[in-house]
Amino acid sequence: MDGLKEYLTRKDFVSSSEVRWCPGCGDYAVLNSVQTVLPQLGIPKEKFVFVSGIGCSSRFPYYMDTFGFHSIHGRAPTIATGIKVANPELSVWVITGDGDGLSIGGNHLVHALRRNLDMNIILLNNRIYGLTKGQYSPTSVKGQITKTSPYGVIDEPINPLRIALASEATFIARALDTDPKHMSEVLKAGAEHHGTSFVEILQSCVIFNKKAWSEISDRSTRENRLLYLEQGKPLIFGEKRNKGIVLRGTDPVVVTIGEQGITKKDLVKHDMYREDPVYASMLVMMDSPDFPLPVGVFHAVKKPVYEDELDAQIKEVTALKGRRNLQALLRGSEYWTVSNNGASIKRSTGIRTLDNDESNIMDEQIHALLKSTDPLTASLKTTVGKIFYDYDYKRSKMLSPRDSIASAIAHFKAAHIECILVGDSKRLYGILSERDIIQNVVLTSIDRDRQPISAIMRPVYEIMDESNSIGDVINILSISGHRHVPLRLKDGGFGLVTIRQILRFIHDTVEQVEKKEMEE
Amino acid sequence: MAAARKKQTFWSEPIGKVDLQRVAVVPSGTTIVDAVKEMKYNQIGCVLVEDAKQELIGILSNGDLMHEYVGSTLPGDTAVDIIMTKNPFTGSPELTVQEALEIFHSNPFRHMPILNDGRVQGILSIRGLMTFISEHLPLEVMNLPPDSSLIPSRTSGE
């Protein structure tokens, strides 16, 4: 048959493996849809790869007569990323579920989506862990009774499309297992999208979560509960096709065509190509009972594709620097050799292949700074104990928390201090400043003779040690917003370090440095 | 040499570059209680007092209140003028950081009004000055582990 192209058919993608899903499972519908779509894509059979993680849906690669990888839990997007990067010609498909993709592999899914490789991710959402016999999953609804939530789930469920949108996914869509024709259209659109397509498929688990989507999957109510998204067409739904969505301000509202003068023209027109995610976000948030649940393609935008960018970068750098030797790179500037029995470790240096090894320069800079000989910098490493003993500060008298406010006032006046510690030699209960006294005594009618200091003192959240550096103390004072910090003294008891002492210390250090420079 | 380098950078910076503390001003004749309310509301340690020509005539600090008012027989509706520090020490925005350090070093006050053409621009506090100095020493003071004993003494991996 010369000149006539040979087409693949669905059968070419059906493997000989026995399918081990429960009879009636939605997974079959997805399998059938995928096997229907693949021949339409015009891609040679040997270019398809199906990658999965763990779960019922992750048995998918066995049933596809293509290359496949039943990988580790949650890591299908990661392995698929590697496959696509290594061989960008492949058509890579990830099959995952609500547990595998959103719980165990939640992180991997997010990063695969934001990288935007040209691949397809299908997430089968049955709102339950089926393979492991019925534990609740990240999409299980609040109140759902499962094996691990006998009194109802109390977690807030994850909305997979919302996660995808937040992860900068360039194609997001939703389909229903009980409408395989629509699902095939959505999957085909996803496969044709240049970038990562993310398709959530709603399905039930016939054993552990029969009613997962009963409100919408039932043929009799589907028309009233589902909103089929069609590009450029108004958002219309309902058995009589007379309901629609309008925008009031920024809020979507359900209206009936013909009522209150509403016509088709007033309805929101679906535009999946909108660059900004605001409209898609609105659709993603629509859910029963207030809204119909949208299905179809929500968002499809063009963004650079990861493997293209990577390829361009490799070409650019290779042109500039030539091809590199992996061995030399691995051995870098230093490496260690561990002897067979592990008894000795030998460090080798000297193999320098990286002409721009900045890490060494950085280390040198950091060390130069840490070993700085700048006098002021060096002086900040002085222990705070030195300030305490050198800068006039007698051991602070401490007041007992039971002393009256009046006695504290008398002490403040006599000693000309701004602040005092409350406690004894063993324990610090609080700190009392002029401000605490003034604001309480002047603005309230507190009985200063009867009320104890403990009623107005502030708690102490930070106590420094004599061995702390002056730099540490400045740091703490800058953060706390106070003018004093308590100091635990080596021989027991407490003292106070003030900003004034620190400034005096800095002042004297600067003065000494200048004097020395003058002499020189 | 190194100190000289630093001097060129921030010791000679004008005070105008320091984040000055916001100012609470009360007119002459305000009662002591109202002045304290103003301090509490603004969460600051002093209020400035201006006369009818909006010229600075005094400053009232927690210290003044502690020593002149608390425990005295003065009623709360006494005018602040009675206990405030009159004709306070002021600085200009051109004052350098080092000069300001010198001033706080040799004077007992903690707040210095900064005047620009006779108008109050802000208050330089002893705290503000310390924070300014420490912000210029990020490696030595600000961006450090919680305790200086936790600073690595050698490169990791060695």
Image (cartoon, helix red, strand yellow):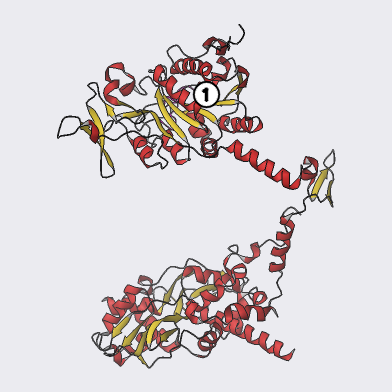
Query: Does A479 appear above or below A333?
Result: below
* Percent x, y of residue A9: 53, 11
Amino acid marked by disc 1: Gly
Q: Nearer the viewer, residue A208 or A270?
A: A270
Give the x, y percent position of residue A261. 15, 34
Region of the chain picked out in magenta, as a range: A124-139
Q: Name which residue lies at 54% across and 19% down.
A: A60
Please state the horizontal and vertical placement of residue B77, each as a whole percent of the image: 23, 86
Q: Is residue B5 visible?
A: yes
- Can residue A388 be seen? no
Task: Please determine whether, in this image, residue B120 is positioned above or below residue A365.
Answer: below
Q: Above or below — where is B36 with respect to A125?
A: below
Q: Is residue A355 left or right of residue A39?
A: right
Q: Are there few (<14), some (14-19), or many (20+) residues within 10 Å of tag 1?
A: many
Q: Quadrant of the C terminus of chain A?
A: bottom right
Residue A222 is situated, as x and y percent measured from the top left of the image, at 30, 21
Q: Nearer the viewer, residue A52 or A352?
A: A352
Q: Is residue A188 left or right of residue A8?
A: left
Q: Which residue is mark 1?
A: A55
Tell me if residue A216 is in the magenta stretch.
Answer: no
Q: Quadrant of the N terminus of chain A?
A: top right
Residue A292 is left or right of residue A111, and the answer is left
Q: Main secondary structure of the magenta part?
A: loop
Q: Quadrant of residue A244?
A: top left
Q: Residue furthest top?
A: A1
